[in-house]
Amino acid sequence: MDKTRVLFVCVHNSARSQMAEAFLNAVAGDRFEAHSAGLEPGILNPVAVAAMKNIGIDISGNKTKSVFDFYKRGEIFRYVITVCDAVAAQRCPIFPGVHKTFQWDIPDPAATTGTDEERLRKTGEIRDTIKNKVEEFVKQVSGDL
């Protein structure tokens, strides 16, 4: 059975989309093949890496990728999920063959402020929101497969 391909997109592919990709592959990798990309790829957010490591998921070796590279290669995804605000999500290219798109307005961990400990706590809260959204997504679309 072919896995259902899902692409998570955010602005820099440095935190939110990376976490979403890792969660989907962890909780339903037997049915889904998750990827992530950014509109303007940056560098991996070390606080997001630490927040994921705190729950036993290592994303430290991940590279940031451009959504436009996926698009130019003609990659096909059944679902595209933007994890940034609606304004940024509008910049995402329209992929052919997409069954459905979702837009999850999730705060950017890079915008967190405070001490290192406070930023890690806030990023952990964002991480948990993403995990919950991914689990809801799996339940929601399982009937479509």
Image (tube, grey):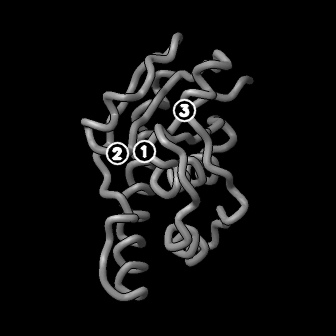
Secondary-structure class at tag 2: loop
The part of the image, by quadrant, that contains residue 81 is top left
Secondary-structure class at tag 3: helix
Give neighbour class at mark 3: few <14, some 14-19, many 20+ (Cα, 10 Å).
Answer: many
Dot placed on the residue nearer the N-terminal end, 3 or 2: 3
Q: Position of residue 98 (x, y in %)?
A: 49, 17
Question: In whole angstroms, how far apart are the C-alphas of marks 3 and 2?
Answer: 13 Å
Q: Which mark is drawn over residue 139?
A: none
- Left or right, 58 with respect to 67, comes to right
Question: In whole angstroms, how far apart are the C-alphas of marks 1 and 2?
Answer: 7 Å
Q: Which residue is the site of mark 3?
A: 67
- Asked if labels 3 and 1 touch by Cβ distance under 8 angstroms, the answer is no
Q: Nearer the viewer, mark 1 or mark 2?
A: 1
Q: Which residue is the site of mark 2?
A: 84
Give neighbour class at mark 2: few <14, some 14-19, many 20+ (Cα, 10 Å).
Answer: many
Name the quarter where the N terminus is drawn. top right
Name the quarter where the C terminus is drawn. top right
For the point 32% across and 38% down, which residue is it? 88
Q: Which residue is the site of mark 1?
A: 11
- Left or right, 47 with respect to 105, comes to right
Q: Is residue 76 above or below residue 68?
A: above
Is residue 123 at least partly visible in the picture? yes
The amino acid type, in three-letter code, at marker 1 is: Val
